[in-house]
Amino acid sequence: MSNLKQESTLSRKEITRQTKPILCYNIDSIPPKKGGDELYSALKTAVKDSIATLVTKLEIPAKDAKSWKVPAGHLWRIVCTHGPQVADMNCWSLSNPKERFYSSKTRQIHATHLTTGDRLWSNMPYLRPLATITEDIIAYGFDDDGAGVHDVIGSRCDPYTHHLMTGDDYNCCCHSNLTRAAKLDGLDEMDVHDVLNVFMCTGFTRDTNQYFTKPSPVEVGDYIEFIAETDLLVSASTCPQGDVSLACGGDGEPVTYPLGVEIYKIDEAWLKERGWMPSEISGYAGKHGL
């Protein structure tokens, strides 16, 4: 019997309702970023300060997906180039695609919506930062409806749910787009995973706690920037829902745009001098008590 029950005649429901929220993880005990906050603060202006040099530039066509490789210690940006558009992003360890972005653990450690300083964690048994957000130009925060930008709560739009709702086969969705891109990289549909919803504005309704979307606040010139904490394969789909101002499976034809991707090489000596190094997989022995 708990101490709370011994000291009170309150029911468990009453105890729960009267208890203030308890953060699930003591995030202060998570190992700090290699190089520290000072380095990551400096990375926000690494391109402007000519510490990072553009090496690759590509475009993700509207209603499609494209993948790219990012060496450890390089930056990449997803850029709004033509108009308000969201993207669904996957990433894998380049040397081992079994290690991939783990949205659930990222959400537990950070928040439902990510921004500058948050890290993209990989799945178990690896559990390490794959990337860190170095700059988020939108920096939306949370509005009066509880909506935020860059969420790790919703999955990608997919043909299975579309078929469930409409009875139609529809291959122009983020899951299918990412699957086609994955196959070009020697992967398959089972390697496609839950995403970071880049530029997407979402939340949960106050009355029914249902997942909702709002038109993305992204404007031409806005970007989100990451540093690769290890060698990565990254893929992103320009969502066929455009800025997601229309419900999936609903009426209307969304307006869609391409998005830009830029990859920058950071001066290696500059990084090394400041103590940065690639992330390492979990040191847990993996015995599980067996």
Image (tube, rainbow, N blue to C red):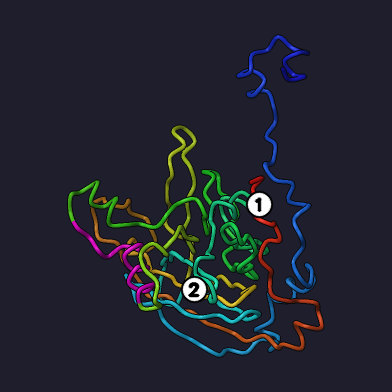
| Quadrant of the drawing holding the N terminus | top right
Q: Is residue 40 magenta?
A: no
CA–CA distance between discs 2 and 1? 31 Å
Main SS type for the magenta part?
helix
Rendered position, 7 above or below 63:
above
Q: Amino acid at mark 1?
A: Lys
Please identify, in this view, whether the residue under mark 2 or under mark 1 is nearer the observer: 1
State the image coordinates of residue 46 (x, y, percent, origin top left).
69, 81
Residue 15 or residue 286, whichever sits in front: 286
Q: Amino acid at mark 2?
A: Val
Rendered position, 97 above or below 215:
below
Q: Residue at x 70, y 88 (%)?
A: 267
Q: Residue at x 38, y 75 (%)?
A: 258
The residue wearing badge 2 is 234
Q: Secondary structure at mark 1?
A: loop
- Tag on residue 287? 1
Q: Which residues are magenta?
A: 169-183
Q: Secondary structure at mark 2?
A: strand
- Which quarter of the figure has residue 241? bottom left
Q: Residue at x 63, y 23 (%)?
A: 17
Of labels 2 and 1, earlier in sequence is 2
Q: Residue at x 56, y 48 (%)?
A: 143
Describe residue 157's horizontal placement relative to residue 114 as left or right: left
State the image coordinates of residue 99 (x, y, percent, origin top left).
54, 65
Residue 219 or residue 192, whichever sits in front: 192
Q: Is residue 181 magenta?
A: yes
State the image coordinates of residue 286 (x, y, percent, origin top left).
65, 55
In the picture as drawn, the residue positioned furthest to the front comes out as 290
Give the crowd class for mark 2: few <14, some 14-19, many >=20 residues within 10 Å: many
Q: Do callouts 2 and 1 mark residues in contact (Cβ within 8 Å)?
A: no
